[in-house]
Image (cartoon, rainbow, N blue to C red):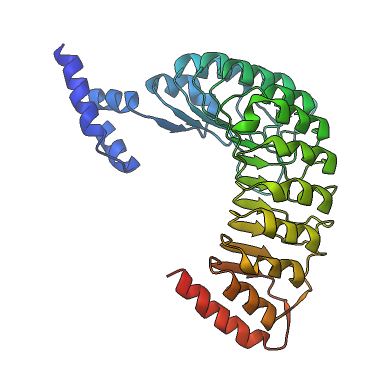
Amino acid sequence: MMERLSDDLLGLILDKFDDPNDRKSFSQVCKDWFRVEGLHRSTLQVLEPDLIPNFLPRFPNILNFQSSVPIRDSLFEFIASTCPRIQVLNLNYKETGDHPYENDYGEVDGMKDIDDLGISAIARGCRDLREVLLRRRIGIWDRGVASLVKFAGNLRNLDLGFCTGVSDDGLESIGGLKYLEVLNLQGCWRITDKGLGFLAKGSLCKKLRILNLANMEITDCGLIYLKEMSCLEELNLAECHMVTDISIEMVVATFSTLKKLILSWMFDVSDVAVSALARGCKNLEVLDLSGCGTVSATGICAFSSHGSLKELVWTKWNFAITGHDLEHLVFGCSTLERIVLHKNAQGKDSYGSARKNINAELCVRMG
């Protein structure tokens, strides 16, 4: 009884320390304090996965498991049985700019990595998963996604960015997640318009807030399905080259809940779509039109009377904009706080003096 009370008191003291260095110092006082610190650890970042069997039993209560390196598939059953309370599984690879290389034996960069069996083991053993981030884990395919959905019904956030094995069948499974709010499918090139149809018919269509469809092979026909998603706040369609003004005007411009929209490097998006967005997306706060070569100042100025826009990104290598256009936009849209233009923007008329006036106005708005 006294030992249990002592552990509880030590735990209360430990909870007062937020700095990792302070907690490390606490654990070095003696064996009991070392043990208690392990029991109260909630987040663990793994850098050397092969040592997991040695150190993981010290941390049975972790809620957040993180690793950005390859992890052998066989270790995940041990992880799940040792730490069944995991709620956040963050296995995203670091954004290095290089895609991991997978050979015919399921090895990534020469090391065996997680695949469908591993993610299934985690899903079966950790039944309270809320966030699963698997960005660039290219061993994950539809079967693993189906197992994850089956056993992790409480998922709120799922990142499958560049998991190139995931296809329409995987989306059919994901559509059944009742509580999913954030879904990243960037770079999943096997997914087609049919897959978006599965999402629209699923339970998540009334709950999903953030959807990333960048770098995907979808068309206007697929985007039309998104009309069923009544709570969408953020949408990323960057580099979806087969999406045009048609679906932007018919679907995206009807989202009254939309706050952030990324349309960068979409070559078939023009002033027609941008004007429709200005009219229909009344709560839009961030709009990224980087590289949209057919958008001109005419479309941008449609936001001059918008009541919510805070940030506009419009970077093109070679475009012309007048000082009058900029002033019309900024002084007309009272909520605007930030504009990003390409450094080589070719100004006309009083462009230089207009920029000084605009910078002064935006500085005042941002305090």
Left or right, residue 219 beside residue 129: right
Compared with 281, 361 (above or below) is below
Within the image, what quadrant is residue 353 found in? Answer: bottom right
Residue 39 position, x and y percent, is 33, 23
Q: Is residue 115 visible?
A: no
Left or right, residue 161 beside residue 90: right
Return the residue nearer the eye: 221 or 56: 221
Compared with 203, 208 (above or below) is below
Residue, x 61% and y 81% (percent of image)? 355
Residue 231 position, x and y percent, is 60, 39
| Image quarter hosting the C terminus | bottom left
Among all residues in the image, which is located at the extreme left?
2
Residue, x 39% and y 30% (percent of image)? 42
| Image quarter hosting the N terminus | top left
Residue, x 84% and y 39% (percent of image)? 221
Return the residue nearer the eye: 359 or 8: 359
Left or right, residue 44 beside residue 5: right
Within the image, what quadrant is residue 30 found in? Answer: top left
Residue 203 position, x and y percent, is 64, 25
Left or right, residue 37 beside residue 315: left
Compared with 32, 21 (above or below) is below
The count of marks equals: 0
